[in-house]
Image: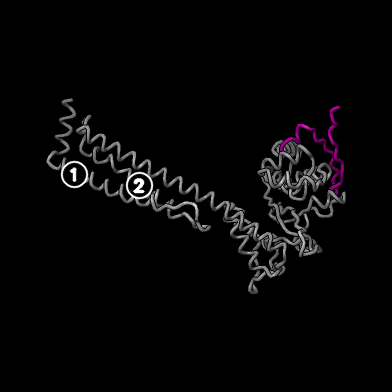
Amino acid sequence: MKSLPIILMFFWGNQLFAQILPDSATTSSQKMASYLQLKFKNSSQQLAVLYQWIIANIKYDKDSALFFNYTSNHEEKIAATLRRRRGVCENYASLMADVATKLNITAFVVHGYPAHANKNKDNSHSWVAIKNNNEWLLCDPTWDAQMNSTNFYMISPTTFIQTHIPFDPLWQLLENPVDYKTNGKKFMYADSADYFLKLDSLQQLIATEYRIKKSTAQNSMTQNWQGFTKMNRAIIAGEKDEQLYNKAVEMFNKANNVYNFFVEYRNNDFQPLKTKDSIKAMLQPISHLLQESLRNIDELGKWNENFQYNPETLLLKIAALKTKVEEQQSFAERHFSNKPNATMNALLLKK
């Protein structure tokens, strides 16, 4: 029997929301976002309905943690959460942040631990930071789902820090972060958060690891998270090095193909005829291609020590190709030194 749509009726501030979320609107985060945008005019209402739906419909299921969070990529994780309607704190937070982002609202999943937790056991936790109406606030859909409340919805950072400690001090969202060395200066968290979110995933991991090192709140959980961050940094850096090395090889191969085409043309006694300038220009792309190859090689190991990709052989090949190109350019210069461009053009016209 087909399940009936879930009707949400609740007061938020002085407003009563009554909203039907049909099954068709909850099969993907994009459909949820589109539905919320269609039914509600402003971001505050959209977030309120989204939050209420999540805490009312996602069941906490610790047994699913391994399936959800270690074998799935982000999109698969979100799809599985909606399909199975269950998960752990990371699933609650990821779903909230993902739909909010699709609503064009800035959101970020924060990892840390409860302030009251045993610091030497794995009591790690996840929640959400949301920037709405140019203000950073925090919410914990997992705790609210378990307590059937909205006690942890859009809470100010000064209050939230009393119950939630993020691994990365940035996400305390405080001018004076707890247990963080600022040398007496206010921490410009709003600017720092905006800048952080513009970084790529590798740069974010490096910045996070740096701030965790500066934190004085060291315990087994922060150390484990720092190790986890370092591992992910190495994985992403390795992937980036692979892309750089493959791009370097690709540029070299293109340069080598240009060279071989020229040599074949020369061996064919420069037939069909071209102008002197156009023949000389045949080798010109090689310089740019080799420069691009070297640029990618220079980037290898920039973010993490590179053990996997040894560019030594490729560098030797690049040097050898440069020498061969110079030899061909010298030959072409000598060969056409007594043949003005006008003469070459005349020969072409005779053809």
**Label 1: how many residues lie within 10 Å, few (<14), some (14-19) or many (20+)?**
few
Q: Seen from this angle, which residue lies furthest top?
A: 351
Quadrant where the C terminus sits is top left
- On the question of residue 340 being in view, the answer is yes
Most foreground residue, 154 or 232: 232
Amino acid type, label 1: Glu
Q: What residue lies at 16% left-to-right and 30% top-to-bottom?
A: 347
Viewer-side residue, 14 vs 320? 320
Rendered image: mark on residue 12: none
Quadrant showing the N terminus: top right
On the question of residue 44 being in view, the answer is: no
31 magenta-colored: no
- Residue underneath mark 1: 333
170 w.r.t. 250: above or below: below
Indicate which disc, 1 or 2, sits on the residue closer to the N terminus: 2
Q: Quadrant of residue 125?
A: bottom right
| Residue 287: image location, x then y, percent | 32, 47
The kind of residue on which mark 2 rests is: His
Residue 229 sits above or below residue 246 on the image: below
The furthest residue to the left: 338
Q: Position of residue 142 (x, y in %)?
A: 80, 50
Tell whether 173 sits left or right of 233. Answer: right
Q: Which image quadrant for residue 181?
A: bottom right
Depth check: give the residue in front, 202 or 132.
202
Mark-to-mark CA distance, 1 and 2: 20 Å
Q: Residue at x 63, y 60 (%)?
A: 208
Q: Is residue 51 left or right of residue 72?
A: right
Relative to 146, 246 lies left or right: left
Residue 288: assigned label: 2
Which residues are the magenta region? 1-28
